[in-house]
Structure formats: structure tokens, C-alpha cells
Image (tube, grey):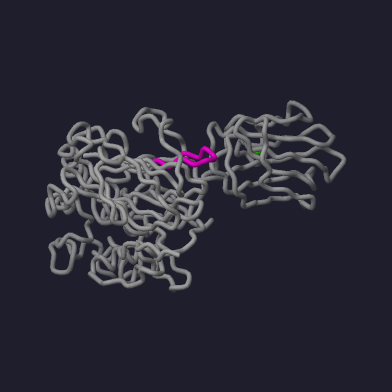
Amino acid sequence: MLLPPPCTPARLPELPMQTSSCAPARRPSTGAARSRTALGLVVALLAACFVAMTPSPAWAADLLLSQGRPATASSTESSAFPAAAAVDGDPGTRWSSAFADPQWLQVDLGSVQQITRVGLRWEAAYATAYQLQTSTNASSWTTIYSTTTAAGGTQSLPVTGSGRYVRILATARATQYGHSLWEFEVYGPGGTPPQDDFWGSTSDIPPANNAVQVKILNRTNGKYPDSQVYWSFNGQVHSIAEQPYLDMPANSAGRMYFHLGTPDSPYYDFIEFTVGNNVFNGNTTRVDAFGLKLAVRLHTKDNYDVEVGENRQTFAEDRAATFQRFTDAVPAEFKVLTRTQGPYRIIAPGSDPSFRAGGANANYFTSYAQSVGVNAATSDIFGCAASLAGHPDVCAALNRHVATLPASQQADPAQYYKAAPANYYAKFWHDNAINRLAYGFPYDDVASQSSFISHSNPQWLLVAVGW
Ligand SMILES: [Ca+2]
């Protein structure tokens, strides 16, 4: 048995050894990451990184995927109760079937989606026996939930599956009437396959012998040839020209680094991940800094497909243009972040001397934080460190400038970064990210705003490295 692979100290979680994991920028680990990085602490929990990863159902506030999507049914009681009424989001409209068994109602999500929960809002005419099923073609179905003892009312059912079509197949009625649903709700994280050619051909990616086939793509727009785009992982260092693929073994955890020009060039960045026996968890991160434009795309054997990272426009422009846009976009206090380690990096504000003790903006967050009862150093607010390490929601709310709003608005991304003080560094990376998802600070996973992706049955992972 091989020894566990090392994982990087910066992402080690503050969990007990026996339950520890190398979950990437998941809340506890990133909180730990920033504080430990900032304090320069040596972490000695490497052996704790060897864990089977089980994605927690709690870490994504999943999206309602079914609302307004095309719905069909085996029958309707009348034109007043169409299938579409079960996915219209209106609690006063419903689908009702003919008065016979079995019946089904299905919704087309438009593309293959991961499905994590199904909500059923039954009218008095409910089903005592039914199955929830998924399909990629609306003809061959996979059952992901089954019951013969249902009691109607409102049900929220955690499920595991994926498909483009999701249906309820109702086989036994509770009443003499049909089956009737006010609402049929399908939830999931909402990955959408890319529609352009940014990722190039994927049909020639060799199958993985190990857990997942990783392919590195040069997206520097000709700035560097493939022979000068380097990746490194776990002691291996190669240019794309030498080896564009890495057949990633299970129980790999940590960071994959990318360097442009030379293997130890100061132009570098990384992604972080854990790869379990049958699951990929990982993310791009701007928690520490921006070094290179990065995006990743995960494709799974059940055709789930998701991408995160910098968006196409950001990849398309020159690095100097991105630096200039950052400078133009952020308030005066943040403009220094392009210069402190420029031209190599745009650093996170909590790492800049100006926002730290003795710096010109050391009190940037102070009075705002105190207004909600938080006494913490500005750099610790940016970094969700020290007293904020155990308070993800509070730290996220301060960074997003929603701390004084009701909880419901704190969960609404439309409210974020609308006034100072706020983490305008994080805002910039959200504004320039695919689906606006980014790790701009350690607890950016609050309200599912981070670039974390996770799915079982991984097939391949593409990593685009830009300039
Ligand atoms: Ca309805």
C-alpha cells in the first residue's frame, strides 16, 4: 500500500484528524488556508489528507432547474390542468391526470444535469406509490427514487442522479381522482456544457486508466508555445508539448501548478482538487491572488458537464488589458493590488500591506464591521481569518457588503458589492468569471458563489491556461 499522497498545507482543513480531508477551497480549509498562509504557520497534517471524498449535500444551495421548462404528461383531467402547470412556479395552478393508473409527468431540463433533490407539492389527489426517474433520451429511464407508502402533502426528496429528462411515474392513487401536483421541482447545481469551441476537440481524449484524464490546454493566444506552458503535479513537471495529459490516480489531492516560459517562472498559478475513487472535487481560486487566467471543465461518464474559471472575454484579452481593467474597475484603495507583486500577480487585499496593521487602509472595514458587532482586523475580514475563521456567513456578508441586510437578502447575489466597504478584488473576479462564480475570498462558497465543482463518475478534466 502506498503512502498517502501529500496535499498542500495551504488547504488543510481545521477538522479533526480522523475525519480530515483535503477538500479544496471548502470553507474550513480555505479559512484555514488564508490564516495559515498569512501567518506563515507550518502545518503538519499531511497524512490526514488521504480520505474518501463524499460531497456534502449541504454545500450547494441547488438551483431550481425545472421551472418553466417544457413539461409533458401521460394524460390530463382537462385542459384546465396541463402538465406545464406543475412547473410554472405558481402554487395556485396544477397538473391533474385522468382518473386511472399509471400516469407520468416529465420535464425536459434542456441538457443533462446533475440532480440532487426533487420537490413534490401534491394536491389532495396524491399518489401513494410512485417512482422518480431520469433519462437522457426520454425513452430509457433510470429510477432514482421509489416509494409505495407516500402520504402526499409537500415532499422534498434528496436524490442522486443525472439526466436531461426527469419524470414521476405514479402507479397508485390515494383517491378516486387522478394524480395532481401543484408543483414538480427538480433541483441541481446547474452545470451547462459550453456552446463554443474554446475547449477544442474532446473526442480524442484517451480514456483514463485511473480516476480521471486531465488535459492541459494552451490558451495564451500565441504568447507562449506549447513547449513553454508547464504543468506540475506531485513531482511531475512537463510542458504541454511534452505531455498534455495526466492520468490522475484516485486519492490524489492538492494543487496542480502552471508556469509560463520556464518551469519555475514567476508567471504561475494553480488549481486545487481532491480526486476520490469515483469523484472529482476541485476549483480554481483567487483566494490568494490572480497569477494566470485559468478555467477548468469537468465532464463525467453520465454526461454531466460543467466549467468554471475566467470567462471567454478575459481569456481573449491581453494580460495588460486585464490588469488595466482591474485598475479601472476598483476603488482607489484597491488599485495597489496590481502593483505590489506586479507584473506577476494581482494579490488579494488581505495580503497587501496597505490593508494590514499600520497600513494606510488598515481600518478599511473597521466601522462597518463594528456596526454589526464584529471587531476584527481588516485583513482578517478579507481573509476570513482569526475570529472570522469560524463564521463563514458573517465573513462572506462583510466582504460582500450585505452584513446589515436581512438574511434573505444576504443570500441574494444581486445585492452583493453594491457599496463600500466591500471586497472589490473579489467582485472583479466574479464579474469576469464563467457564470460569475469565483473564489474571491475563503468563504466565497457561502450562497454557492464559489468556483467549486464536484461530481461522481469523472471522465475527463480540461484545464485552460491563459495569459
Ligand atoms: Ca403550479
Instruction: Report if residue 433 is visible in the image.
Output: no
The C terminus appears in which quarter of the rendering?
Answer: top left
The residue shown at (78%, 39%) is 179
Is 304 magenta? The answer is yes
Residue 234, quarter of picture:
bottom left
Nearer the observer, 344 or 202: 202
The N terminus appears in which quarter of the rendering?
Answer: bottom left
Nearer the observer, 263 or 285: 263
Which residue range is magenta in the image? 297-305
Q: Position of residue 118 (x, y in %)?
A: 63, 46
Q: Is residue 227 left or right of residue 34?
A: left
The residue shown at (63%, 35%) is 135
Q: Is residue 294 left or right of residue 412?
A: left
Most extreme residue toward the front is 1
The residue shown at (50%, 40%) is 304
Q: Quadrant of ligand 1?
A: top right
Q: Position of residue 372 (x, y in %)?
A: 35, 66
Q: Position of residue 316 (x, y in %)?
A: 25, 32
Q: Position of residue 222 (x, y in %)?
A: 19, 31
Instruction: Report if residue 127 is visible in the image.
Output: yes
104 lies above or below 11: above
Most extreme residue toward the right is 176
Residue 105, quarter of picture:
top right
How many dots with numbers? 0
439 lies above or below 218: below
Is 213 magenta? The answer is no
